[in-house]
Image: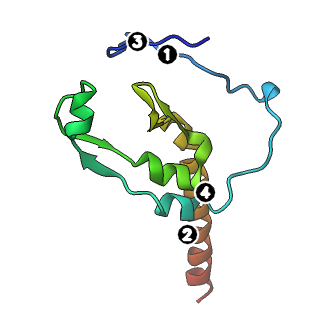
Amino acid sequence: AGSATAGEIRATNNVTAYYSDERFKTNLGNISDALAKVKALNGFYYEANELAQSYGYEVKREVGVSAQQVEAIMPEVVAPAPIDENYLTVRYERLVPLLIEAIKELNAKIAHLEAQLAAK
């Protein structure tokens, strides 16, 4: 069972969670259309509104994404928020594979354009 805390967690060393070893995984394929998925997201600045403040969050400038936007393209990256299961949160570390595949798609486009320019 998971544990919970009502405050900030700080560590002076690494936090290790879940698993990444490929021996535990059945690969179901790369993330398709990663660039289009990334383009569907907006990164933005925000601050806690009145609802967030009622849950104890302070008003300060933050940076993030919308859990609803992420859920629309990759629902497995979104989870119920620890403050109340009626709200959502993003597992930001799980966005990294999407970003990796989007970078690879961009790199392929660049290589194609470079090849076209070299052929002229």
Quarter of the image containing the C terminus?
bottom right
Q: Is residue 67 left or right of residue 20?
A: left
Question: Can you give x and y, in whole percent of width and height, for residue 14 in the image?
Answer: 47, 15
Tell us which disc is closer to us: 3 or 1: 3
Residue designated by label 1: 15
Residue designated by label 2: 110
Please tell me which of labels 3 and 4 falls first in the chain: 3
Farthest bottom residue in view: 120
Judge the density around disc 1: few (<14), some (14-19), many (≥20) Cα neighbours within 10 Å.
few
Q: Label 2 is placed on what type of residue?
A: Ile
Question: Can you give x and y, in whole percent of width and height, for residue 57 in the image?
Answer: 24, 28
Residue designated by label 4: 104
**Residue at 49% in and 16% down:** 15
**Residue at 44% in and 57% down:** 41
Q: Label 4 is placed on what type of residue?
A: Lys
Judge the density around disc 4: few (<14), some (14-19), many (≥20) Cα neighbours within 10 Å.
some
**Residue at 61% in and 53% down:** 101
Please tell me which of labels 3 and 1 falls first in the chain: 3
Tell us which disc is closer to us: 2 or 3: 3
Residue designated by label 3: 5
CA gap, disc 3 to disc 1? 15 Å
Identify the secondary structure beneath mark 1. loop
Please tell me which of labels 4 and 2 falls first in the chain: 4
Looking at the picture, tell me which residue is in the foreground, 105 or 10. 10
- Tell me, yes or no, if residue 48 can be seen here: no
Looking at the picture, tell me which residue is in the foreground, 57 or 84. 84
**Residue at 16% in and 34% down:** 59
Contact flag, marks 3 and 1 (Cβ < 8 Å) = no
